[in-house]
Image: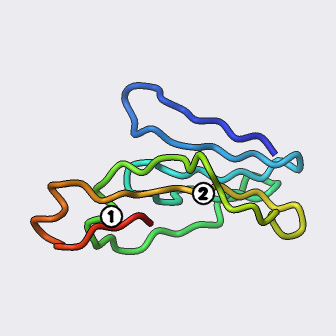
Amino acid sequence: MAVNIINDGDRSPRILLREPTGSTTEVLLYGGQVVSWKNQRREELLFMRSKHGFARNRLWSLDEDPSPLPPANNQSMVDLVLKSTEEDLHTWPYRYVT
């Protein structure tokens, strides 16, 4: 599995996961949202729903210390982290790391 972090300037930073079979997944770091999931035939399998919640408006980061558990059946996985900021405390009075 290849994991690429893409910063091309005009779009939100994102992670592209690519399996040897050709299937891909694209995850935006802004909002931690999976925005594309394609099978080996490059057919899009993900259909977006309505968006809500403040976490979708925040920049997530790649977890530098991910879970030690291996992915099941050699499937691709990526761990993202969202940490509270001082600005968040104005709307949600609790610190968090998710």
Mark 2 in CB contact with mark 1 (< 8 angstroms):
no
Residue 24 x %, y %:
71, 51
Q: Residue at image x 54%, y 32%?
A: 6
Q: Is residue 55 left or right of residue 40?
A: left
Q: Quadrant of residue 97?
A: bottom left
Q: CA distance from mark 2 to mark 1?
A: 15 Å
Seen at 59% across and 45% down, the residue is 64
Whether 73 is drawn above or below 31: the answer is below
Kind of residue sitting beneath label 1 = Ala
**Residue at the disc numbered 2:** 79
Q: Residue at x 53, y 69 (%)?
A: 47
Q: Residues within 10 Å of mark 1 (few under 14, many from 20)?
A: some
**Residue 13 x, y percent position in the rendering:** 45, 38
Name the residue carrying label 1.
55
Q: Position of residue 73 (x, y in %)?
A: 89, 68
73 and 92: which is toward the camera:
92
Side of 60 where 18 appears, left or right = right
Q: Which mark is residue 93?
A: none
Instruction: Name the residue type under label 2.
Output: Asp
